[in-house]
Amino acid sequence: TIPHELAALNSLQLLAFPYNCIYGTIPSEIGSLRHLLSLELHGNVLSGIIPDSMYDMDKLQLLNLANQYGQNRNCTSSSNQVIDMKYKFGGLAGQIEAHGLEGKLGASLADFRSMKGLYLQNNALTGVIHEDVGNLRYLRWLFLNDNFLEGTIPEKLTKLKNLRKLLLDENFLRSTLPEDMSRWRDLEILTVNGNSMYGSIPLGLYNLTKLEMIRLDDTRQASSPWNIDPDEGFTGTISTRIGQLQRLKILLLSNNPLSGTIPMELGSCEELSNLRLHNTNLSGTMPMSICLLRDKNLNSENNEGVLYADCRPNNGTGEPRVQCDCCSDCCDFTSRVCIADD
């Protein structure tokens, strides 16, 4: 466990114990480390709530409490108890061990006024993303994925002008993307997959020319990861302005009711290495400009798993939704089965 005596090191600026077998809770005395700049406790088996005293550490610039479950290894406690690090507290797999930080995220996060990197992924945190997180003016990395967060993505998050990576995937959010997201000029990674997302893709997204990864896939979610609601997911079309995202390497839009045709301008994204457009309402013919990317980065050693579309006969007998001669994997929209193209 984390010793309470650490509080005596009141001039400490860096505390890092990542990927050990530290279990138990975070002691409230840790809030006495008022000069701490970086706290890294990721990759352990901590549980309980984040103590309120921690929010008094207003000089903290990096807080990494991620990955308190999900590791394929076991820890042995001082009492010889074996702790399975695979499952999170409150998870849906019926596990025996219960760990992962829990409790609700609230307005207190905004007290970290010097924060640059906030890594809380792979825990059992609940509640909503409070709009005051948008006041963390120095924040660059916000990782909240793989928790039990609910509610919406606050519009005030667009105030985070220095944001580079925003990972919100695999929660229970029910939200649209913020309309004013074009303010995230430095954003490189955006993931909201595995939530109950809806609405159209804001035009502001196409102004984020530093984006390298966009994951808007698997957003037809309802009350659990296995309940699919066909009325949810991103709707509308893919704008021709997507060609402006020329640093894009990964674009996953599958399992959404997007409609229209696949814009030829997507072929301007020459760094693409993974493009998934299957299980959508997209139709027409895969543009030649995208097929030509198969001779560049949109390829793999085994020529599979890089370009997906609904190009198999629908329901095994009908016409495919998308005609594609260059897809690595073709999917049947009705059965949702994808098979590597012959």
Image (spheres, rainbow, N blue to C red):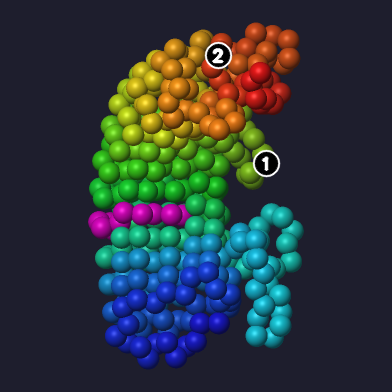
- Which residue is located at x 46 percent, y 32 percent? 273
Residue 186 visible to the viewer: yes
> In the shown orientation, is residue 329 left or right of residue 150?
right
Residue 273 drawn above or below residue 142: above
Q: Are marks 2 and 1 in contact (CB under 8 Å)?
A: no
Residue 324 is tagged as 2
Residue 104 visible to the viewer: no
- Which residue is located at x 42 percent, y 39 percent? 213
**Residue 306: horizontal and vertical position, in percent?**
53, 30
**Residue 336: horizontal and vertical position, in percent?**
67, 26
Q: Is residue 242 magenta?
A: no
Q: Is residue 137 magenta?
A: yes
Residue 226 is tagged as 1
**Residue 225: horizontal and vertical position, in percent?**
63, 44
Dominant secondary structure, magenta: loop
Q: Secondary structure at mark 2?
A: loop
2 or 1: mark nearer the eye = 2
Amino acid, disc 2: Cys
Residue 108 is tagged as none
Q: In the rendered view of the protein, which quadrant contains the C terminus?
A: top right
Q: Secondary structure at mark 1?
A: loop
Q: In the rendered view of the protein, which quadrant contains the N terminus?
A: bottom right
Q: Quadrant of residue 295?
A: top left
Q: Quadrant of residue 335?
A: top right
Q: Quadrant of residue 15?
A: bottom left
Between residue 302 and residue 265, name the one nearer to us.
302
- Which residue is located at x 39 percent, y 21 percent? 266
> In the shown orientation, is residue 240 left or right of residue 147?
left
Range shown magenta: 135-144
Looking at marks 2 and 1 on the same chain, the residue that comes earlier in the sequence is marked by: 1
What is the CA distance from the residue labelled 2 to the residue labelled 1? Answer: 30 Å
> In the shown orientation, is residue 274 left or right of residue 60?
right
